[in-house]
Amino acid sequence: MPRIDGRSPSSLRPLTITIGNMMYAEGSCQIEFGNTKVICTASVEERVPPHLRNSGTGWVTAEYSMLPRSCRQRTQRDSSRNSPNGRSLEIQRLIGRSLRSVVNLDLLGERTITIDCDVIQADGGTRTASISGGFIALAQALSVMKKRKMLKHPVLIDQVAAISVGIVGGTDMLDLCYDEDSTAQVDMNVIMTAKNKIVEVQGTAEGLPFSRERLNSLLDLAQGGIADIVEAQNNALKEALNS
Amino acid sequence: MPRIDGRSPSSLRPLTITIGNMMYAEGSCQIEFGNTKVICTASVEERVPPHLRNSGTGWVTAEYSMLPRSCRQRTQRDSSRNSPNGRSLEIQRLIGRSLRSVVNLDLLGERTITIDCDVIQADGGTRTASISGGFIALAQALSVMKKRKMLKHPVLIDQVAAISVGIVGGTDMLDLCYDEDSTAQVDMNVIMTAKNKIVEVQGTAEGLPFSRERLNSLLDLAQGGIADIVEAQNNALKEALNS
Amino acid sequence: MPRIDGRSPSSLRPLTITIGNMMYAEGSCQIEFGNTKVICTASVEERVPPHLRNSGTGWVTAEYSMLPRSCRQRTQRDSSRNSPNGRSLEIQRLIGRSLRSVVNLDLLGERTITIDCDVIQADGGTRTASISGGFIALAQALSVMKKRKMLKHPVLIDQVAAISVGIVGGTDMLDLCYDEDSTAQVDMNVIMTAKNKIVEVQGTAEGLPFSRERLNSLLDLAQGGIADIVEAQNNALKEALNS
Amino acid sequence: MPRIDGRSPSSLRPLTITIGNMMYAEGSCQIEFGNTKVICTASVEERVPPHLRNSGTGWVTAEYSMLPRSCRQRTQRDSSRNSPNGRSLEIQRLIGRSLRSVVNLDLLGERTITIDCDVIQADGGTRTASISGGFIALAQALSVMKKRKMLKHPVLIDQVAAISVGIVGGTDMLDLCYDEDSTAQVDMNVIMTAKNKIVEVQGTAEGLPFSRERLNSLLDLAQGGIADIVEAQNNALKEALNS
Amino acid sequence: MPRIDGRSPSSLRPLTITIGNMMYAEGSCQIEFGNTKVICTASVEERVPPHLRNSGTGWVTAEYSMLPRSCRQRTQRDSSRNSPNGRSLEIQRLIGRSLRSVVNLDLLGERTITIDCDVIQADGGTRTASISGGFIALAQALSVMKKRKMLKHPVLIDQVAAISVGIVGGTDMLDLCYDEDSTAQVDMNVIMTAKNKIVEVQGTAEGLPFSRERLNSLLDLAQGGIADIVEAQNNALKEALNS
Amino acid sequence: MPRIDGRSPSSLRPLTITIGNMMYAEGSCQIEFGNTKVICTASVEERVPPHLRNSGTGWVTAEYSMLPRSCRQRTQRDSSRNSPNGRSLEIQRLIGRSLRSVVNLDLLGERTITIDCDVIQADGGTRTASISGGFIALAQALSVMKKRKMLKHPVLIDQVAAISVGIVGGTDMLDLCYDEDSTAQVDMNVIMTAKNKIVEVQGTAEGLPFSRERLNSLLDLAQGGIADIVEAQNNALKEALNS
């Protein structure tokens, strides 16, 4: 079955990373998977949440939001809703957890790095794009902190990236766009390190519970996509650190 | 390594189900995994969310909350916080999604069944207990609706249960209690049908990214626990339906 | 006129007290007046509200909430309403005030004891059950604090209990259930000490303003009920303190 | 014991009623008990709360608020607080209940009359002043509705007024000012009809539980004050209706 | 074209200032422009917003609110709305900015003066009345502070007043009442010092963009009105300071 | 006095307009004045606010928000604040009012066009950039509606643009950047039509009240800048409509 945009089932959409696009942020990038576009910034602040005060330990957290017209239909801003936006809260908790998994918080010192992921345009895969782009912003911010002598030791202990996979029309597919995602029978987000270790896996049957075998074939597919993203992250960071 | 309470790594905690404990609800149970105790109720209402009006289709949704002193430290009520409780919202979205996966919403008619999961006492595994208990409340409510001639066809298309697994001190373990959970290197919630199909899997590395092999051994462990819970659900429901 | 459940006008509903039912709380009980069931917990925290800091004085406060399906119709959780729940706020202010009336706050030290009253099932009289049960949780917590050498002197200066009375179908009645309460012409809550002194009295004419004589006959009725509750409180506490 | 302002224990403070002071409201007055000043307005709207739609029945409700600098210390506005103002909610529920007790809601038709009580200056007794003044605004609005042929039958079934009494320094006193109220051992609000029937009684022991005898002597005192207020209400209304 | 109330286009409405009307506030007045009536109070507090702590500098801020029935139609209180009241926030920011323009905040010391402007009755021009009256409350409070030896040097550096002008039915008019304002083609608020310097000017074309010439003729009109208000402010303050 | 970036006092910053940058919106552009970058979208919805239902009349409204790290210091998102963001509400009211001044709402039909202005990067002048860019998004959306036969008659009655002027270090300057704005003695926003008519003027003295003459020289400066922006708007729209 050919895909909507002619890709093979195991191909990523065109991936573009523009690093350092936000002039005030310590780290930033605009990451694009096809029509999905996210601005990620890393902001360093000399404060930690109350439960970490005087612990010597730092914190990495994330916030996620969509521009009202990033979607086909305009959506209400969070600030004008009556009830909290459960989806946004769930996604930003996932982003924060994923990024913290590759950071040594003790070596960060009593500082908070906030990763803001603002979706400019949404065509599926915004949470995985946020994690992959958020890692770049984080790495750039840590590099800036190192230059400013704020860090004595390397804080990153690994590299993390994320991608969606799913079963669409019976076929396993990588990096679902919105039209594929909305008809998927199974939808899975996989977050892995550069060394193929799982950081987080979230798979959901949308109407079709799936077998253990199928889970494995989807993970194979994700692993391939993660490798490509890791390479693109490295290229973007190399360029930024040399400039 | 012996576990805190002497169980083997692959044993559930003592599982108790008291069905029909809430006199007003169409379906209800108190489900207990050891010291974790959750009251689950199913409330049937003749209304649907705005986007389903005049669609002929029903809805199943869930709400999750903890009594302030269900925990070691008293926690603030959601209603007195300034910011929404992201964890609760994420959990109730998961419960709702899991239960909807075994319901034919078209055959439910334009009605909403709300599953309330109120944690009376928390010692780890409250979200999986909520799903396993929520299924019982839902099944009882559907049985009541059938007796009241509100349903023409069976609405349940499968049976669902949930359990946590994790890696604690290097060992794979089933049904983590709070002390195990808080030191786990990997924490995973598995939601499966009676036929061993995956409805949802959420695995998180807490500091230790894990291999594909380890993911598989954890899923083996979960599958065994799910089978035991499914049997307990069936026993409870049989008793209630016969009375 | 016989009552709905066959009781005499001056009888309490069956009263059950299960003390120490919540494993983490310093004090706790489940108190049941017929079908009305409330879980009361007492939580001790080493902090006081801002206006008492550095005063050497402690604080006792209460929170009151109902499970969504404790009622015939499911009610919205406070956390998902747009407007504050005036009834809950009024009730928890009453509970706090009543319990503080029997506590020497100076001898408590700079600590807060929070009494959480969570209504599991509601069939009238939830606020008076909360006060009567709240006193038990409070007394148990103070006893625990004494054993932990946190208190030098007895903090309780009296014992408090509460009951509803009302005029239903022209007859004075004690301990109204929901069906009686919703048709009552006069509804009164009486909070008294073990020595028959009034701590708080709140009487409301629902459509039928009443005479001073009738007020007195209702207070006579309440006084009898209070004596029975005081005895039940003492029995429950004796058992707990001996164990 | 002489009182702060030289009054006898059984005297009201100087009572002033300015009726019709708000040009847009259907009914209004400014009522003053000494330094306590409240503006009460009655607003008639052709709508009822959802639960009364198509019932043919009307509604009377109240809102209560204090100007930020009506008090000795400036208080935050409700709209800029994080948590709801429990005291205000409790008071406005009491005002609404008291006024509804003298209204035949069926004869009002499907309309809402909202009584706004805005405290301009507070020196004790603001809730009872709000009820006594709220009745005047309500009566004037009903009179205006009658002139506009909106009502076929008299809607008021009685007349209501309210006053505070208390035990201060061991003495029973009527109409407590702030300094008396803040040191009172017992504080009671009494709401009565013109015929000496009780609409609502709320008595609270502030540290000193009190006997049934003392309750009766306080009610005697209140009854005398109510008679004076009823006369002042009648004089104000007579003047307004004749003009 | 004669005006609704017979005034000439360049006349103010009858202007009344009652200074010191609020017994607890450090400064206060009720200011009336015809039927528009605003209570302004100045409250002095020994604290500053977080960003000014330890700066030695003080702050002047304002809050603005309308009684629900100050208008023809009853409006909801801010505290019972779902969304913030943008108009009120905008007005109180304007009042605060205007008053700060005539205060030397360094000489005030680390204190906050809060100007509360509560509209009792609204017939157009409430924001300009709030500024003109707010200045009087502020000046009285500063005079009180001086008497209490809280200030070493004069804090006021100028005197400020405000008035509305507009184009109604093609004619330039001063001090618009509500009926004029609601049909105005151009609506402008002008805030000036006693020396005819502009502090703030906000002109809005309601449907009819206007020329630079017309802007100038409107400013001429405003300048005349400001001079009259400045004189009235001075008379009120003189009287208060002499008493 | 040379300006920070070498511009003359009467020069705009480099102005870039990228029209149609958002794939889902009916109208969109990214507008940049130097380092200030705003994404403006126009969303057409077939609904109107309650007060316009069944009036045949449409509505144009605006929302304004800043990305958290669009500024030098990260700012909290509106959705995570306790209090509403007064500045944002004030700005979005200004944008909406300015755009409505050039729209014939009767000819729009019962539809709402929402202009979202999201500031990606802020270096002064974000509200005026939002108006100038908002007009482009609005015009493009109306052009799309015309192509889709949704409009019978031209809806735009004029063209609107906006710019800031101010007095910095004693000199009148056009289009202030953040560093200039934060030290300006006078700050003014001018919104004008293509024909040099004033739609809105808001001038504020920051510490230095200014004369009528100075107001006029600032308006001269603004008029020149508006003419340049109008030309750039026309070029961008011409290109878009031809493609």
Image (cartoon, coloured by chain):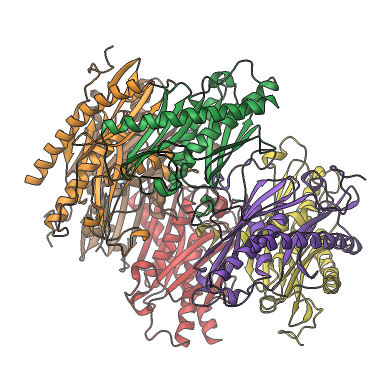
Chain colours: A brown, B red, C yellow, D purple, E green, F orange
x and y percentages locating residue E123 in the rendered image = 48, 47
Judged left or right of residue E211, residue E122 is: right
Residue closest to the far left: F242
Judged left or right of residue C163, residue A150 is: left
Q: Nearer the viewer, residue A159 or A65?
A: A65
Q: Nearer the viewer, residue C95 or E188?
A: E188
In the rendered image, which quarter is residue B162 located in? bottom left
Q: Is residue A24 above or below residue F108?
A: above
Judged left or right of residue A229, residue D61 is: right
x and y percentages locating residue C75 in the rendered image = 54, 68
Q: Is residue E243 above or below residue F106?
A: above
Q: Nearer the viewer, residue B185 or D201?
A: D201
Q: Nearer the viewer, residue E48 or B96?
A: E48
At horizontal 58% and vertical 66% (from top left) the residue drawn is D144
Judged left or right of residue E136, residue A123 is: left
Residue closest to the far right: D1
Q: Quadrant of the N terminus of chain F?
A: top left
Q: Is residue F190 above or below residue D106?
A: above
Residue F46 visible in the picture: yes
x and y percentages locating residue F95 in the rendered image = 31, 42
Residue C200 visible in the picture: no
x and y percentages locating residue C95 in the rendered image = 72, 58
Q: So how many labels did they put on this image?
A: 0
In the rendered image, which quarter is residue F185 located in? top left
In the rendered image, which quarter is residue D232 located in? bottom right
